[in-house]
Amino acid sequence: MTVATNLFKGTSFLRAKRDTLLAIKKAQSTLTSVKKSSSSVLAQAAKELGELRGRSLFYPALFSGVGNGSLVELIDGSVKYDFITGIGTHFFGHSDLDLIGVALEAASKNVVMQGNLQANTELKDFLETLLSLAGPPLKYGWLATSGTDANENALKVIRHKKTPAYKVVAFKNCFHGRTLIMADITDQDAYRKGLHRYQDAYYVPFFDPKDPHSIEKSEAALKEILSQHTADIACFVFELIQGEGGFHPAPPEFFKRLMDICRQANIAIWVDEIQTVGRTGELFAFQKLGLKDTVDVATVGKMLQNCATLYTEHYNPEAGLLAGTFAGSTISLAVGKRILERLKEEKFFGKNGKIAQIEKWVFSGLKNLQKEVGEETLSNIGVLGTMVSFQFRKGDLEETKKFILNLFEEGVMTFYCGRGPYKVRFLLPGGAITQKDFEKALSLVKKTIHRMES
Ligand SMILES: Cc1ncc(COP(=O)(O)O)c(C=O)c1O
């Protein structure tokens, strides 16, 4: 028995925790539906923040700190459905009492941040849980505080083993983060404007469902790159569902065939699951697609609250290569572990899991709306677990943004993705949302469509 065990299992601590949770529960129970905003309060706060950052927010959303599942309160007292969840981080919605309970204990621990020379049990437990759910051949993991950092570490462990090869094959329209190298690899010129170009990546087209020869074309592109630059290429980084690029999926066959070529050429296979982890119907999209045995390196983040790079025995680097002051906060590690446990215990995965069920009613809800408003207004519906997108009218960027801002005013927070046609996208709070919530939000989508017609 340590002093810590006595404290955290002791009656006084548990009573204080219970009282706090009861107070939150009482407060959040008053948030039951969308409430319109007094936009001037939000607009002023957003303006002030914009002056501090040098750039305004996409929409004037500053959060009060209390929510109830899919609903969240903003600082002006308005209440909105959150269908973008901080770009995919709050899968269990707002003010989830179980997660707050875990966070309360974590927040009472001796340190805020953990890292290389400060590991508490939360760090070990998070990594152990993550690795056990990933399973072999992934054997080791290194934690990071952003998805981009996890990707940097992935590229490091790969280059370390493949040196002098250093180049990366990636998909056209991919997104892998914002550090100098990740921005260089990310296939979006707007994100690397004015930056020195390392030109470290070659690009292969992603799967195109409209093209019957799409797989062969991507295979040919990869073979061509390999034949010209074999000695330089260290890896292929796969986004198994293109996220920022427009929520594009591909069949297992597409990846299998490309990965077979990578195997034969002896280049590393790295899957970037920073956005997909937890939300496609299995913990990892590579598990859902039957690619588990082929993966050398995987990166995760977002909904797990903490980020990590996982790798096989072969890619475990020598000491000195990976380090860093921070690996995660005590809260993010403790809550991240609880999220992993709940995803499994509460049966989110599998053919009949909760995510598969959400996928069905989300798809039919959007299809019904499409019937009402017409295909010229709403098309290109994509539902991949809790990653949802659709096209508004012609998918023009400015019009899509305007639609999203109007929808925000009506009470639903969303965002956009794609590279033209642009799409409206939801990263749904799958652990909190009900079918009723979704239908109510769709009625606001419909209202927004009508508002834009008039
Ligand atoms: C596929 C993918 N990789 C990397 C990142 C970067 O993660 P972060 O924003 O946590 O640095 C993102 C973020 O959207 C992502 O979707």
Image (cartoon, grey):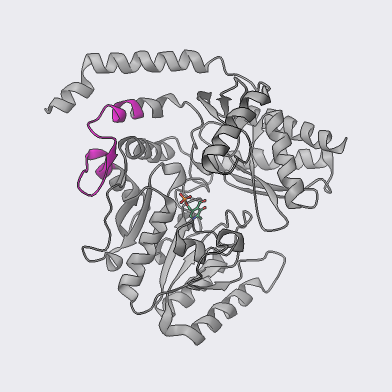
Q: Quadrant of the N terminus?
A: top left
The residue lying at 51 percent from left, 45 percent from top is 279
261 horizontally vs 450: left or right = left
Task: Reply above or below: 316 against 327.
Answer: below
Where residue 317 sits, quadrant-wise, is: bottom left
Q: Quadrant of the C terminus?
A: top right
Where residue 208 sits, quadrant-wise, is: bottom right
- Given the current orientation, which residue lies at the most extreme left position? 1
Along the line of sight, which residue is nearer the eye, 419 or 372? 419
| Residue 24 coordinates in the image, percent (x, y) | 44, 17
**Can residue 61 be seen here?**
no
Q: Is residue 378 magenta?
A: no
Q: Magenta segment, which residues? A: 103-125
Task: Reply above or below: 405 against 242.
Answer: above
The residue lying at 49 percent from left, 46 percent from top is 350
294 horizontally vs 206: left or right = left
| Residue 195 coordinates in the image, percent (x, y) | 52, 65
Where residue 336 sits, quadrant-wise, is: top left
Number of disc labels: 0
62 horizontally vs 145: left or right = right
**Can residue 358 be seen here?**
yes
Task: Reply above or below: 15 against 202.
Answer: above
| Residue 271 coordinates in the image, percent (x, y) | 45, 61
| Residue 237 coordinates in the image, percent (x, y) | 47, 66
- Given the current orientation, which residue lies at the most extreme right position? 454
